[in-house]
């Protein structure tokens, strides 16, 4: 059974036209640790958003993809060490 949960932070704070909107979704299947868990979030711009908010969201996105690329390289190096160097 696939269950989904959407966090409702937008209900807690009043939003105005031009605020960046952040959405987060958590999906899980089964009972952890045997099941699967996934979490994702993204930010959308609605209306005229100021430049500081745009820069902040773009920086967060760039840093996220940079961290994913670094972790990918580290996992490939670990795989190489385990398979070929028998470490």
Image (cartoon, rainbow, N blue to C red):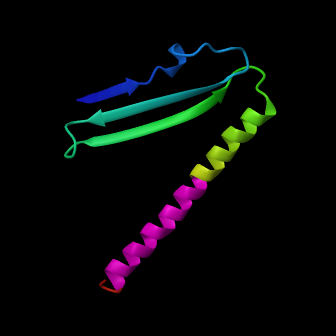
Farthest residue to the bottom: give it: 85
Magenta extent: 65-84
In the image, residue 79 lies in the stretch drawn in magenta? yes
Residue found at x 61% / y 13%:
14
Pick the quarter of the image with the N terminus.
Answer: top left
Residue found at x 51% / y 15%:
12
Q: Position of residue 5 (x, y in %)?
A: 37, 25
Horizontal relation, residue 40 to residue 30: left or right: right
Q: Position of residue 31 (x, y in %)?
A: 19, 38
Q: Position of residue 28 (x, y in %)?
A: 30, 35
Horizontal relation, residue 3 to residue 67: left or right: left
Residue found at x 43% / y 67%:
75
Helix, strand or loop for the magenta stretch, by majority: helix
Is 86 drawn above or below residue 64 in the view shown?
below
Pick the quarter of the image with the C terminus.
Answer: bottom left
Quarter occupied by residue 6: top left
Farthest residue to the front: give it: 13
Residue found at x 49% / y 62%:
71
Choose between 35 and 7: the one closer to the eye. 7
Q: Position of residue 47 (x, y in %)?
A: 74, 19
Is 36 drawn above or below residue 46 in the view shown?
below
Q: In this figure, what is the number of numbered marks?
A: 0
Horizontal relation, residue 2 to residue 71: left or right: left
In the image, residue 49 lies in the stretch drawn in magenta? no
């Amino acid at each position: 059974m696939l269950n989904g949960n959407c966090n409702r932070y937008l209900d807690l704070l009043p939003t105005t036209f031009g605020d960046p909107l952040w959405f987060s979704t958590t999906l899980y299947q089964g009972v952890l640790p045997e099941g699967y868990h996934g979490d994702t979030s993204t930010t959308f711009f609605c209306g005229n958003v100021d430049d500081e908010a745009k820069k902040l969201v773009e920086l967060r996105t760039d840093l996220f993809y940079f961290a994913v690329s670094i972790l990918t390289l580290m996992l490939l190096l670990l795989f190489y060490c385990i398979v070929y160097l028998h470490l």
